[in-house]
Amino acid sequence: MFWPTAFHEDKVLEKKLNGCLLDAEQCRLYTDLFFRVEQCSGALIYDPVANCVVIEETPGDRTRPLHHPVMRLVKALADKQSNDSHSSDQYLATGYDAFLACEPCTMCAMALVHCRVKRVFFGKLNQKLGALFSRWKLQESKYINHHYQVAQVKIDRLSSFRPNPSFRVRSFSRDKLRNLQSHSHTSAQIFDVANAVESQLSRFSNCLIGIAINKSSLYVSVVIGISQSGNAFLSLSSSFNDTPETGDDTFNMCKRFKVACVISEQIVPGENSHTFKCSEKINLFVTVFNKLPIRLFSENSELVDHRILYAIQTSGSTGQPKIVHVPSSAIMPNIVDFADRFELASTDTVLFSTQLVFDPSIVEMFLAMYLGCELLIPMPSSDEPQSVLIEQIVTHFDISFVQLTPAHLQRFSKSTLQNLFGSRSRVKCLLVGGDNFPTNLINLYRHQSHSIRIFNVYGVTEVSCWASCHELKDFPCPEAMPIGEPLTGTRLEVTDSGLVAIHGRRCSVEFIMASTDCTITEDISSVVIDKLGKKQLYVKGRNKPNSILPSYEIENLISAQYPQVIFAKLVYQNICSFLFLNSSDPNFCVDNSKLMKNIPKHLRPTRVFWNENLDSFITVNGKIDEKKLIAHAREHLSGQCSVNVANFLQKSYHIELNEDNLNFSLRNFGLGSLEFAELAFLMEGNCYKDIKMSSTELLQLLMDEKTILKDLVDMLENTLICENKLEVSSSTPSGSVFTIPIDIVTSDVSDIQLVWSSNLGKCIDGSPVIDSGQVYANSHAGIFRCFDYASGEILLDYEAQSCALEATCGISPDFVALGGLNGDLLVFERKTRLLREVLKTAGEIRMTPVFESDGTLFCGSYDGYLYVRNFGNGTNNRFDISATQNRGAMRSSPLVTTNTVVIATLGGHIVAIEKTLGETFWCNKVDGPVFANVVQISGTDLCCVVTVQGHINMFCLKDGKKQSELQLAATVFDAPVPFQQSHLLISGGNGLIFLLEYTSHLVLLKSFQLAEARIVRSPIVLGEFVFVITVQGVLYKIIASNMLKSCSNLSCTSIVDIKEETFGSPVILQKSEKQFHIIIGSRRDLLRCFFVDLK
């Protein structure tokens, strides 16, 4: 007898049994999601229906259970839904998937139960506290009211990486007749050597092993052996010609990277080392340096957890070279992505074209190992560049994968380029990266029926080589070359400050593992919607230590206008930019005036160089050496003026040097900002050590509309012709004393925290000011803001249209005033925080406005007038200081006394006027421009004036009679500050600080020097401390009393280092004896408030 039954199929179980729980697309997607959480040791919630990440979190304080990633994730999800009016139908994580880097503890597992998650995917087992697998299986408990599915994600990592058994190597060289020779190395030969190396390294664990071997099959075998032994590798120069004590570069690299031992083909010299042979069959030696400060990765658990694969040094293009340790989890997604993207297999070939110190070489080597295909190695030679050998290989052999830099392509012959990009190209995939894409060069030689696939790749060393890839389908325009889509496990975005941020890769930089998976690069970017409505990311240039440089934007602009230009490189040196252009026809060039007309004025380069030989400017990495280009530009310009000033001025700027012209302003000869920048660059290179001015400071002098031709001739002759000596008038007392060095000692900061920050666009050159708990700051981007000092809340946010705001604002109890470079004087009411009025002037305003005690406002303009606004009676006045009397523009703020206003000019005039009628009381002339404010000496009727050349003058306020003078051996741009009774402190160029005493006359007591620093702002005296900030963005603290003591040296400590340029003084508030709030603006974009606690 049979009973009727109904069978309900368990669809999930059936899929598991059939091995198809996830299809191929889901596997790829879920792998990417897992990479994302693994990189930051975090967790995320994913909505499979909407195909989006709902929320993600990283660990907080590891000592607090509530800061576990899952607990932070659940809280963030609840907060998000409570604030989202559209999520009323969604209860927490119902129907969602959770991805966790690590198996959760019981508390976290229960939190996932309560938020009703559907599935949980985790990676690393939690042997001690794991609640889903390791200790027990919470999800299977019958006592809970919700059950979710659980899966552990197991991804094959390089920690168990073994090259494909079919991996092989073929090396190439050229004989004496320049014929191509090749030699094959079988898998058995490769692995025999690798196994011998692995055996000898059994005593090392989680160490960094140096490889001092040239690129060869032997090098590849050693890399495999080191990787199999569980250690990491570092490529070193194969030359050990000296001992460690002499500071040889290779030994220095070993010390910096903390190398445990070095594998080489020779016995490394040195008394403090021990060498043994790898095996009797191969000529390989392992050298251990007893005196090197070896630091095993096992000392840093984070580095051990991430399984470091290799170490490398960045090129230093954005500053100092950095040490980077790359884990396998960061580089392997790159390898796997390329294998899939380019459809490569074991039958393909990969060219080992890049240098070992360049991270794309890692991609080439491990891609071939991963695929088990053939790696083609061009052997290095001292007789000829490696590019010559590579040319022959790509022409005569079938190659599946080639990586080249744009500069490398530039070196190829015309016939090689025609073969490479022709219809019968023997290359399957060509990747071009490391610099701006050479669109015109490729378009010139690319055949319509080409077979080669060409890709633009983008990345930085700090995220393990490449991060994105874009394939060229058509013949692109140079102005539109996107960096492409991100690689597997990688995500790109543009930050609020316009920089590329790369997510999904974590590397160790300077022995510190990144705390998140987000690396903010120094590359300036933009997002553009293409014809298909898809967002495309473009890189316009790179941030470098001295300024923001949109170099690609200009290079692409020129390349788009002139298809003949196959190479364009813009390099910067301080305020100057030099554009190097090469064309396909060596005889082709564009007239400079015509070229400049096609470039926006604010982007125009200082000088253009055509068709220079690039061979001497290419680095070992195949990139253009920008320092060599700058040196070439300086040498070229210096050669023009080193013989005769008159010839140089006539040839370069069409200025005739005669008596009639000497007293004309430089602007009368048609010189503009580009010409002034070039002159400043040239003079800085020849005379910096003697007059101690940077090109920025020189530019300010040259661009002053009152600077005449005679001033320029005098400077050129003194610095370029007369052996760089400047004569000082013997009638001026010399300020020559022994200079006391300032030693930087161990910092006494116990805690420093960033309280708040705000992006003001760019160049916060004025000093922030604080009054009644409110902080005011402005920038060259035209942004003016008022902040609450404690919280950073923006109370006033004003943006001036097309107007840079350079100088610090002036403050009274009722008003705030600041001037713009367009001549507008802006006045705001403090109570309402609204713009009250705009006072128009006919020149730039570069000074800080001054309020008198009754609220009357004084401000000078470059039009030569001092503007006076009386808010009490509503009157406006304008007093002629230099408009009709050729005294020079006014840059420094006036000194306002009871009846008198005293102001200095860039023409070196000190003018005292009656403050209500503007009648001139007296006028004196000093020997140079004055940038520093005129200050009154406390308790006296004397005022102090300091010229840029360091000449100090003391005048009587009543009659202008000179009371005293002194010459300092430095440039001075800021006013002296009172210091402990009858003393003054003055900061000067070249890191100098002068201590003066004043009674009836000035006496220079001491000078102190902070080596390799530039100080342009006055010291800040606060209680028992003196604070000094450098242009490099470092704030130092000095014990004030020590400056008066008799000593051979002076100590200081670093308080804050923003690692960016700053031209303004900080605001320093002392909260207690050892606690301070410090507010600093940078030349890049940020105003920051720090809390500092001293020990």
Image (cartoon, rainbow, N blue to C red):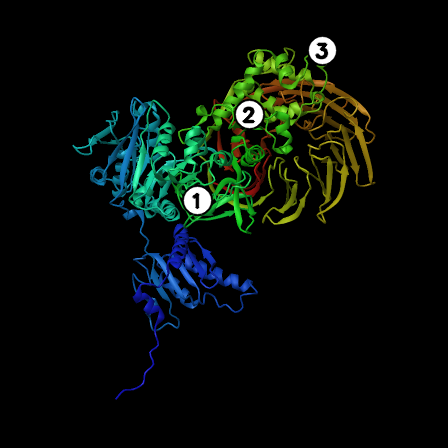
Label located before the other in sequence (3 or 2)? 2
In front of the other: 103 or 34: 34
Residue 544, x across and y down, in percent? 51, 34
Q: Secondary structure at mark 3?
A: loop
Label located before the other in sequence (3 or 1)? 1
Q: Which numbered disc, 3 or 1, marks the residue closer to the eye?
A: 1
Q: Which residue is mark 2?
A: 588
The answer to whether 6 is drawn above or below residue 769 in the figure is below
Q: Residue furthest left?
A: 280
Label located before the other in sequence (2 or 1)? 1
Q: Secondary structure at mark 2?
A: loop
Neighbourhood count class around disc 2 (C-alpha, 10 Å): few under 14, some 14–19, many 20 upward? few
Q: Which residue is mark 1?
A: 467
Q: Secondary structure at mark 1?
A: strand
In the rendered image, is residue 64 in sight?
A: no
Q: CA distance from mark 3 to mark 2?
A: 41 Å
Q: Which residue is mark 3?
A: 659
Neighbourhood count class around disc 3 (C-alpha, 10 Å): few under 14, some 14–19, many 20 upward? few
CB contact under 8 Å: marks 3 and 1: no
Q: CA distance from mark 2 to mark 1?
A: 37 Å
**Which amino acid, by three-letter code, is at mark 3?**
Glu
Say whether residue 454 is left or right of residue 160.
right
**Which amino acid, by three-letter code, is at mark 2?**
Phe
Q: Which numbered disc, 2 or 1, marks the residue closer to the eye?
A: 2
In the rendered image, is residue 484 in sight?
A: yes
Residue 1009, x across and y down, in percent? 52, 24
Please name the residue shown 66% across and 35% down the image.
Answer: 807
Residue 961, x across and y down, in percent? 74, 18
